[in-house]
Image (cartoon, rainbow, N blue to C red):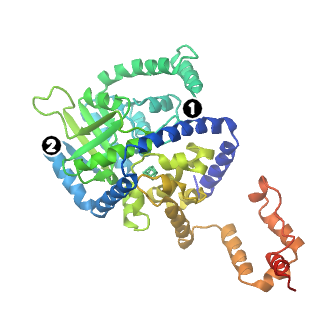
Amino acid sequence: MSQANLKKTFLNKSEIKAMDVEHKRKLSFNIGKYNEVVVKGKQQFSDLDNARKKAKNIKWKTMENLDQYLVEFEQNFIRNGGKVIWANDALEANEAVLEICKAHNAVQVVKSKSMVTEEIHLNDFLEQHQIESVETDLGEYIQQLDGEAPYHIVTPAMHKSKEDVARLFHQKLGVEPNLSPSELTLVARRNLRAKYTTAGIGVTGGNFLLADIGGVCVTENEGNGRLTTAFPKVHIAIVGIEKMIPSVDDLNLFWPLLATYGTGQNVTVYNTIFTGPRKKNEPDGPEEMYIILLDNGRTNLLKDPQIRESAYCIRCGSCLNACPVYKNIGGHTYGATYSGPIGSVITPHLKDFGEFKHLSYASTLCGNCTEVCPLKINIHSMLHYNRTLAVKKHETDFTENTAWRMWKLAMTNRKLMDIAGAGIKTKVVNKIFKDSWGKRRDDLSFHRSFKQLWKEYKNVD
Ligand code: SF4
């Protein structure tokens, strides 16, 4: 799709969602619950501000020396018996997975929740090669049944009510309509249990990479990540290179921060560190473990000092929940894997800047995203930076350029401003902004200028 079409689609979808009262009700309900619990989660920190600063500092140090940490990680992971694959882009990562599947005659893969595998569209790729890929996280399972991408980076089915899920299960799985949430969970559990034992390969993402021990951390609440990696003979973890932290000791800070800002928990229920395949004398675990270290545009984030901070993101989803735009237009509208404020920052750099720069305008720049980010990532400034970059790269369109030129001309020339009377100004401005500002608002009125008001105020001629 061309840039103009992507932007048009985004605007059209935004308009529809923003007017969808039922959609707003569901999102408000779920985000409201999040807001309640996150306050409690934060109470576990004796000095939250300091914890956030410390975490940001660790990520700063790691990203500034990522080349060294990646090599350290690779050496340690190989020493543990694991195999490392470097993937420059989505295709390289997908082909690596396919090759491993073929080598093990695997026709079925079980997957735990992973945004990176969404980013590279692994499920579609495997399906094209006649390999079934089954989502085992409940939210992802629901989305897969519905043929939809995740709606939110932490809660994939956030936009669905329990009634929507019951209806979906009835349609797709033929179970009774109107099942309760616990009954629906049991249905999913029953269907998935069988898959763990028949799948040849288990695929996970990774919340953190640990350089000092060559470990991959997977954080989840359902235990499906552990089942995904315990039964199949091969485990493939696909992880973005920016997930690196220096040491296993840093987890005592990052695990609670992620849990609190992600779901309001003190610590997520299941936290697993994988350090390679099953060792001699170990009773379970995969016989082989691969890690695919994915770039796919991340080095674009790292090479620009103005945007590098976006690579500190631990994908907690907090900025999405706080964003007035996300709360109105929802996740799918963005047309990208990563939605909300951080998605709008990174997507133009991960993909094509020209095609996705319009996302950086999907913000009021209120700064709430920056305020709620556990890493204090300066998100709203980077959204502003992307807009500046669009101008510098001459990526703005004719209408915008002309509008700003006219505005500048008028604002820097008092006489010019005074030429047109109040009536003409009112007419011209309302005509220009008829389709944007004027669609849902009263006409703007310039019956008295600031100059006139000032004179009246000062009581001078
Ligand atoms: S930018 Fe910050 S708030 Fe947003 S998902 Fe990443 S870590 Fe969470």
Badge 1 is on which residue? 160
The kind of residue tagged 1 is Lys
Q: Residues within 10 Å of mark 1 (few under 14, many from 20)?
A: some
As displayed, is residue 274 above or below residue 335? above
Q: According to the image, label 2 marks what residue?
A: 80
- Of labels 2 and 1, earlier in sequence is 2
Query: Residue at 62% across / 53% down in the picture?
Result: 5
Q: Position of residue 418 (x, y in %)?
A: 83, 81
Quadrant including the C terminus: bottom right
Is any atom of residue 453 visible in this view?
Answer: yes
Disc 2 marks which amino acid? Asn
> Is residue 337 among what the camera can see?
no
The residue at 28%/28% (across/down) is 200
Answer with left or right where residue 313 lies relative to residue 232: right
Q: What whole-number distance in Å separates the C-alpha atoms at marks 2 and 1? A: 42 Å
Q: Regarding mark 1 in the picture, which secondary structure is present there?
A: loop
The secondary structure type at the circle numbered 2 is loop
* Left or right of 126, for residue 183: right
Q: Position of residue 420 (x, y in %)?
A: 85, 78
Q: Which residue ends up furthest to the left in the rendered image?
A: 281
Q: In front: 170, or 93?
A: 170
Side of 286 relative to 314 (left or right): left
Extreme residue toward the top, this view? 176
Residue drawn where x is 19% and y is 55% of the image: 72
Single out the mark in the foreground, 2 or 1: 1
In the rendered image, the vertical position of residue 189 relative to residue 87, given as above or below: above
